[in-house]
Amino acid sequence: MSDAGFEAKGACLCGAVKFTATAQGHMDVCHCSMCRRWTGGVFMGVSCSDVQIEDESALGVYASSEHGERCFCKTCGSSFMWRSEQLGFYSVSAQAFEDPAAFDFTTEIFIDSKPANYDFANPTQKLTAAEVMAMFSSEGAPE
C-alpha cells in the first residue's frame, strides 16, 4: 500500500465513536509502557490527518503526557487514538478501521521498551525511544 493518504472510515466496538480520516497506508506498533497499559498489548496505529469524529461527546480524552492525549470511547472503553494537537499528529487504532488489512505493518517504535515475551514475525523498521523522540523534535511528528 502506498503512503499517499486515502479516506478511511471506522468505529469503536459499540459504534458510538464513528470516524472518517485521511489515513496513511502503513501501520506502526508502539511498545512503550503507556501504550501497553492502555491497550493491554501493543498499540497498532495508523498515522492520520483530518480525523473527523461523528459525535465528539462520545469520545473520552486522557492527557497521558505533556505532549499527548489518549482517546477512547466513553461507552465501551475501546482504545481509539493517540494524538498530539500541538504537533498536529494523530495515530488511530488500525483495528478500528473498516478494513484494517489496508495497512502494511512497517515500523515498531519504542523497541527498547518491548518486553521479551513476544515478537512479531514481520520484517519491520525498529526505532528506539530516543530515535522516535528525535523525529518528533526535528520534524514535528513522525509520518
Image (cartoon, grey):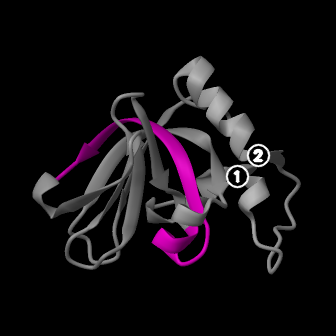
Q: Disc 2 to disc 1, how far (Cα)?
A: 5 Å
Closest to the observer, 119 or 86: 86
Residue 27: image location, x then y, percent: 63, 50
Tell me which numbered mark, 2 or 1, is placed earlier along the sequence.
1
Mark 1 and mark 2 in contact (Cβ < 8 Å)? yes
| Within-10-Å neighbours for mark 2: few <14, some 14–19, many 20+ | some
In which quadrant is the N terminus drawn?
Answer: top right
Residue 93: image location, x then y, percent: 48, 58
Above or below for 138 versus 6: above
Callout 2: helix, strand or loop? loop
Closest to the observer, 123 or 21: 123
Closest to the observer, 62 or 108: 62
**Is residue 77 a member of the stretch shown in magenta?**
no
Residue drawn at the location 24% of the way across and 62% of the way down: 17
**Is residue 49 a member of the stretch shown in magenta?**
yes
Residue 37: image location, x then y, percent: 51, 73
Residue drawn at the location 80% of the way across and 81% of the way down: 117
In which quadrant is the C terminus drawn?
Answer: top right
Residue drawn at the location 18% of the way across and 52% of the way down: 54
131 displayed left or right of 9 = right
Span highlighted in magenta in the image: 36-54
Instruction: State the residue lying farthest toward the top.
Output: 138
Residue 142: image location, x then y, percent: 60, 31
Residue with the mark numbered 2: 128
Residue with the mark numbered 1: 110
Closest to the observer, 125 or 51: 125
Above or below for 66 versus 35: above
Instruction: State the residue lying farthest toward the left.
Output: 57
Looking at the rendered structure, the kind of residue marked 1 is Phe
Looking at the rendered structure, the kind of residue marked 2 is Thr
Residue 78 seen in the figure: yes
